[in-house]
Amino acid sequence: MSHGNNNPPSDPPGKPVKITLTVEASSLFALGGTTYTQVQVDALCTLSDDNNDGTSTDVKTYVANVYLNHNVQWVGEVRYPEGVDKGFSIAIDSIVHEASQISDPDAPSNQNFFADGTIEGGGGRSSNVNAVVNNNQSLINQLDVYTINFSVYDQQNNNFSFLIDPKLRANN
């Protein structure tokens, strides 16, 4: 007679998360040399992740669940790689914690989840950003309002820089 636990061992809490910024690159690049609004930029971008949080067409309300002491990677991709966006690329230049809640005064909190307020990408036309969430239990269920600074590159390596303001939610 066995007195042991027959349940399978549980996975350690959390996992790395990859957040993908998808951009209608040719359309956004065309705005680069003009006066444009943040609404126009947001409308040409979507965010998704490999954490089953879905895809958001409203980047202002998108919230990705991330995990304490685990990596978060931000990558960029074009919406139509074999169509109008062929030859364009998206570089994630930096991730910047917003120290105030000006961009979202209704957010219940705004904690910096990372060791630095600004996390730089690797540079170049295919730059990504990686950072490990602080291992701080007080961050659980808190939000981090931040800015993704990114660039759209065309076939000739010309580029324009843009930004969007999504959120992260910390989990154990």
Image: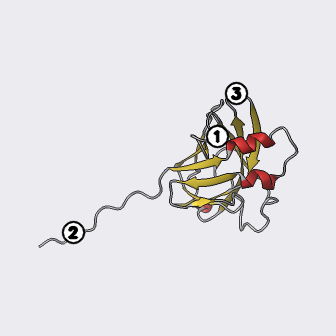
* SS category of the residue bearing label 3: loop
Work out whether residue 20 or residue 118 is closer to the camera in this orientation and state it: 20
Residue 59, quarter of picture: bottom right
Work out whether residue 2 or residue 143 is closer to the camera in this orientation and state it: 143
* Residue that protrudes farthest toward the left in the picture: 1
Q: Is residue 122 left or right of residue 43?
A: left
Q: Position of residue 82 (x, y in %)?
A: 57, 40
Q: Residues within 10 Å of mark 1 (few under 14, many from 20)?
A: many
The answer to whether 163 is drawn above or below residue 102 in the figure is above
Residue depicted at x 88% and y 45%:
35
Q: Nearer the viewer, mark 2 or mark 3?
A: 3
Return the mark for residue 69: none
Q: Nearer the viewer, mark 1 or mark 3?
A: 1
* SS category of the residue bearing label 1: loop
Return the mark for residue 157: 3
Amino acid type, callout 2: Gly
Residue 149, quarter of picture: top right
Residue depicted at x 61% and y 37%:
86
Q: Position of residue 101 (x, y in %)?
A: 79, 60
Q: Which residue is mark 1?
A: 85
Q: Is residue 143 left or right of residue 163?
A: left
> Can the viewer see residue 50?
yes
Amino acid type, callout 3: Asn
Q: Which residue is mark 2?
A: 4
* Residue that protrudes farthest toward the top in the picture: 156
